[in-house]
Amino acid sequence: MDPLSALRDFTMRGDLEKIVRAGEEFRFGADYAFPCAAETAYRSKQGSLYTLETLLFFVNHHHLKHTDYIQAARLNHLPTVTFIDRKPLLDYLQGKISSSDAIQLFPSSSSSASAAIAAAADVAAALPDPSSAFAFAAAAAPSAFAADAEGEAEEDAAAVDVMTLIRTVERPLKDREAILECKNRDFYAVLVASTRREEERQRMESQQRKDGLVAKSRLMGAEDRGLGYGEELGFGDSGIKPKLNLKGSKIGEGVPIILVPSAFQTLITIHNVKEFLEDGVFIPTDVKAKQMKGPKPDCVTVQKKFSRDRVVTAYEVRDKPSALKPEDWDRVVAVFVLGKEWQFKDWPFKDHVEIFNRIIGFFMRFEDDSVESAKIVKQWNVKIISISKNKRHQDRAAALEVWEKLEDFVRSRSHA
């Protein structure tokens, strides 16, 4: 029995629940077994033959609205029955009509040929290798039809039946998941390597924070003992006594600070600043916030990774200016602005002119945003950095532009 007839028989008997999937084939109770992807004799009005798994899924879900049925089929990665084929197909499978013009009938062959084909199908189905089944079917067909000399029409019919047999016993060698497999490649090693890199990065960040705290504590201890900065570092009376200016224009001691807005309306926040500045990749804040585990960090450390410079400076990124101590403000070197006046409320500066003379400002925007979005920002002394909404390969250039302007500003401020 062919797959379409078997499906119609079980549908009419109300035995659809007895059709179960086992690997890559459907088993009709103990009676039949067909490959899931086997083509049936029912042809769509679009011209193609429906497969068994397509028809079985349809007859089990025909009660759904067509749009809901299409969505369910897509979730299961299955082709769908067209709207125009729904009613005549269902009427045929349920036995309301006995035949349909959509059924593709193959020419019948002689009894000896049919017997040979049936025998070949039984043997081929038992073969583990589809190529073996193909070879067996190809070898069996000529001998089966050689016994009948009924002319060229019989040979054509045999050819059609042979191809049907071959398609019936075919097995997929690769599916969507298997195609992603790499021979002789163990991805566990990749996972271990990436985990080690993340642990090393966290270790370096922790050490940098400790170094900054040690330097700060040594400096405070020296001030408490009345020692100069040069004396504490061992310069003694050599005449080299660097002047420490915590309230002046130079950068204060410790790790430099970059401030970012805490509001989600801006492109760069404490959630995604690390990926942008270190890896040159922009990840939307809402996406990154969902990926992060635990509460939002109060501070993250960033470094310029993609640089040929051997000297790498670490920066602290914070989003709570109100938590900064007076001496911390001397370490603030940059700020990503939101474009709103209230961002600078309670800052220890008298106006925007003083802020952006002491601190370099950056305003991140999408390149296709309206000019109005940066109207206020253009009145300030800030650097406007544009990125694309979709072209992530351009993010690196934008990040490099930020680093270049930031490093130039830090050097000029250090020599002020």
Image (cartoon, rainbow, N blue to C red):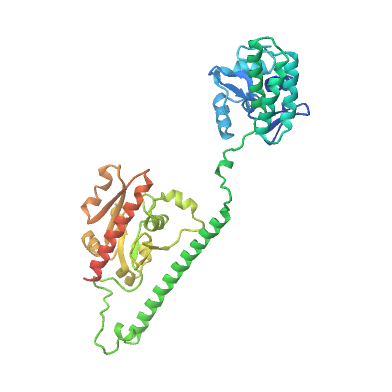
Task: State the image quarter where residue 207 is shown.
Answer: bottom left
Is the N terminus in the top left, top right, bottom left or bottom right quadrant?
A: top right
The image shows residue 232 at horizontal and vertical percentages of: 33, 85
Residue 7 in sight from this viewpoint: no
Image height check: is 88 above or below 177?
A: above
Residue 104 coordinates in the image, percent (x, y): 62, 15
Q: Is residue 212 left or right of residue 6?
A: left
Would residue 273 be found to the left or right of residue 363 on screen? right
Q: What is the quadrant of residue 211 in the picture?
A: bottom left
Residues 263 and 215: in front is 215
Residue occupying image coordinates x 69% and y 25%: 139
Front residue of 48 and 276: 48
Is residue 320 toward the left or the right of residue 186 in the image? left
Query: From the viewer's perspective, is residue 136 above or below residue 357?
Result: above
State the quadrant of the C terminus. bottom left
Residue under the image location 48 percent in, 51 percent down? 290
Q: Count numbered badges in the picture.
A: 0
Question: Residue 209, position in %: x, y?
Answer: 42, 70
Is residue 263 or residue 313 the one in the foreground? Answer: 313
- Residue sitting nearer the eye, 145 or 46: 145
Rendered view: 90 above or below 403: above
Find residue 259 and report its image quarter.
Answer: bottom left
Residue extending farthest right: 30
Residue 361 appears in view: yes
| Residue at the limit of the structure toward the bottom, as seen here | 237
Q: Position of residue 5 (x, y in %)?
A: 70, 19
